[in-house]
Amino acid sequence: MASTTKAVTKDGGPLSFMTRLSQHVYLYRPSPTSITTTTTTTSSKRPPPKLILLFSWMGARDPHIAKYLTPYYQSLFPSTPILLIKSEMKHIFNPKSFWPEMEQAGVVDVLRDIFGADMLRAGSHSFGNLEGGSTTALASPAASNNDSTKEEKEEDPELLIHLFSNGGSSQLLSLHHYLLSRSSLQLRLPPHLVIFDSAPGQMAYFPSYLALSHVLLPPASRARFPLWLFTPATLQRVLIGPLIHLWVSFLWTCNFLGRFVPFLSKLESPLGRLAREQNDTSPNKGRAERERGRMYIYSEGDELVNWKDVEGHMDEARQRGVRVRAEKFEGTGHVGHARGAGNDGGIGVV
């Protein structure tokens, strides 16, 4: 199929190996040589995914993103294209604000180039289970060999999704809703596996303050006292810090009222909405279709996402029939679990 990708430019810097399709969307296509000579397979002897879809955390910087892309994906699946979608704070509070950029970047064109007509199929209403498709990537090789059928092989996951933190979770949901909004076709992603890395979290005061501070505040000045009192960075932190506290206080109060006062349920926090929608199995919502399993990567050392929130979400997913695996790390920080997982970055599930 001829490519219709709207290539914009090749950036310099850490992501120079990717084509920038828009401000927050990047595409890596392996060279024809690597595609024809690579015979990489997964641990279950399945072919590599046709696409890796990576959603970075809120405000992630290019050098940090590149550290995950290069060792954990290009070395594992060198013949697989990578579509990177970045996340900013505005995307969490107003998900539809990203839709025009997805149109500009030609995200649907990229997906159609890779998956063809499969993108147009509505798919079954099964959610992360064996009905309508195989979850062999999350099962043992022996079980895969015994349970596979011709129909299941046709529905084997062809897409690997790796989302980081609540920012990545927000962008995945935004993509699902955007695809459903495309005319009367209501497009869906093809059968896929999802890795939840440091997600999802719930509204909590200090973790939310820390997350927003990382995005809105400059790094602390390294000047010595008393000079650091008069640096631009210090002045910005003094002025903006209290405003962040006020904003988080407002969000926390709204979330509290929305959870415990029935007629104020619309005050639910963005983080609560993200966690709820990721486990929504209602038909015709996109999220509830064609997911064939998920993996949670988390740690008690995560200062931004409480491990109990992750396990609570995991338990709810299991109760709703989702095929789930999890890897709990020791001593790793937020979105840092893959670095403590060795060469496979914690994605040995595939």
Image (spheres, grey):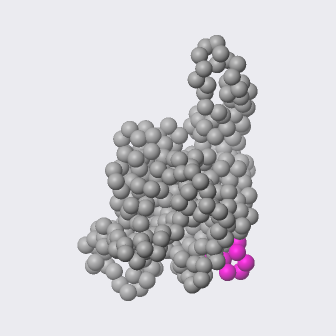
Residue, x 37% and y 75% (percent of image)? 37
In the rendered image, residue 349, in percent from the top left (x then y), is placed at 36, 62
Q: In the rendered view, does 145 fall on the left or right side of 32?
A: left
Identify the image quadrant of residue 72: bottom left
Identify the image quadrant of residue 340: top left
Residue, x 61% and y 46% (percent of image)? 59
Is 316 located above or below residue 254 in the figure?
Answer: below
Q: In the rendered view, does 151 fall on the left or right side of 86?
A: left
Residue, x 39% and y 54% (percent of image)? 345
> Magenta segment, which residues?
181-187
In the rendered image, residue 46, in percent from the top left (x then y), is placed at 35, 74
Identify the image quadrant of residue 105: bottom right
In the rendered image, residue 18, in percent from the top left (x then y), is placed at 56, 61
Frontmost residue, 128 versus 6 = 6
In the rendered image, residue 181, in percent from the top left (x then y), is placed at 70, 72
The C terminus lies in quadrant? bottom left
